């Protein structure tokens, strides 16, 4: 946290705005593409975890039955 007593809250926000101008924001196309990648990875993880869950459930049922 910066020294707020020296420059105050106004100086802090001025610095934040100055730094935000240096940020390289993604284009709409990049945002859409990366959102698609995140959703695809999430779906892949869901499928893998569901499959593992079913495999382990069947394995434990077989162990407990015998």
Image: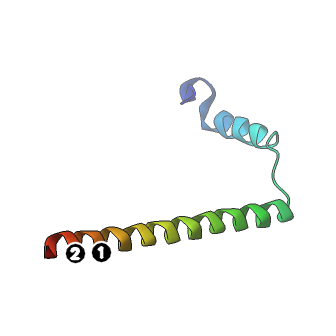
Q: Does residue 24 appear left or right of residue 11 in this picture?
A: right
Q: Could you say where residue 39 lies in the image, as x and y percent from the top left?
A: 64, 68
Residue drawn where x is 75% and y is 37% of the image = 19
Relative to the observer, which residue lies in front, 35 or 40? 40
Disc 2 crowd rating (10 Å Cα; few below 14, some 14-19, many 20+) is few
Q: Which of 33 and 9 is in front in this view?
A: 33
Give the number of the disc on residue 58.
Answer: 1
Tell me if residue 15 comes above or below residue 60 in the rendering: above
CB under 8 Å between callouts 2 and 1?
A: yes
* Numbered circle sitting on residue 14: none
The alpha-carbon separation of the residues under discs 2 and 1 comes to 5 Å
Counting every numbered tag in the picture gives 2
Q: In which quarter of the image is the C terminus?
A: bottom left
Q: Position of residue 16 (x, y in %)?
A: 70, 39
Q: Name the residue under label 2.
A: 61
**Position in image of residue 18 (x %, y %):** 78, 38
Q: Residue 54 appears in which quarter of the rendering?
A: bottom left
Question: Relative to residue 20, is residue 56 depicted above or below?
Answer: below
Circle 1 SS class? helix
Residue density around tag 1, few if under 14, some if 14–19, many if 20 or more, within 10 Å: few
Residue 8 locus on image (x, y percent): 60, 32
Q: Name the one closer to the observer, 41 or 29.
A: 41
């Amino acid at each position: 946290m910066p020294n707020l007593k020296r420059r105050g809250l106004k100086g802090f926000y001025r610095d934040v705005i100055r730094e935000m101008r240096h940020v390289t924001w993604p284009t709409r196309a990049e945002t859409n593409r990366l959102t698609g990648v995140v959703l695809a990875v999430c779906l892949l993880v869901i499928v893998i975890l569901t499959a593992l869950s079913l495999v382990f459930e069947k394995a434990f049922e077989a162990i407990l039955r015998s």
